[in-house]
Amino acid sequence: MPTVTISKKEYQELVKTKIRYERLREAVQEDLFSPPPIKDTQKVLKELKSVEKYNKEFLRSLSEGLKDSSYFK
């Protein structure tokens, strides 16, 4: 096998790229597009409200979107 010489900086960049690729591959291998396990919109909204990270406008918009979603009907 022939030897290839690269700089330490290039090597470190390759390692970082490999790690990012592996993380992305693992995320995609998981069931990324599976439907949520909960079909109760009120329960979903209640859980999101309890986290206290989302403002009222976002929760209102999400509520409207969930009502239009065919999954939650």
Image (cartoon, helix red, strand yellow):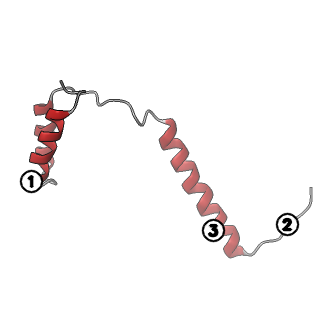
Q: Is residue 37 above or below residue 23?
A: above
Quadrant showing the C terminus: top left
Residue 45 in percent (x, y) is at: 13, 39
Residue 35 in percent (x, y) is at: 32, 29
**Kind of residue sitting beneath label 3:** Glu
Which residue is at 15% across, 48% downward? 51
Q: Which mark is residue 4?
A: 2
Mark 3 vs 2, N-terminal side: 2
Q: Which mark is residue 57?
A: 1
Q: Which mark is residue 13?
A: 3
Residue 32 in the figure: left or right of residue 52: right
Element at badge 1? helix
**Kind of residue sitting beneath label 2:** Val
Label 1 or label 3, whichever lies nearer to me, is 1
Tag 1 near tag 3, CB within 8 Å: no
- Say few, some or many: other residues with alpha carbon within 10 Å of mark 1 (under 14 / 14 to 19 / 20 or more): few
Residue 15 in percent (x, y) is at: 64, 61
Quadrant showing the N terminus: bottom right
Element at badge 3? helix
Label 2 or label 1, whichever lies nearer to me, is 1
Write down the quadrant of residue 67 in the picture. top left
For the residues labelled 1 and 3, the Cα–Cα distance comes to 42 Å
- Say few, some or many: other residues with alpha carbon within 10 Å of mark 3 (under 14 / 14 to 19 / 20 or more): few
Toward the top, the furthest residue is 73
**Kind of residue sitting beneath label 1:** Glu
Which residue is at 48% across, 43% downward? 27
Mark 2 vs 1, N-terminal side: 2
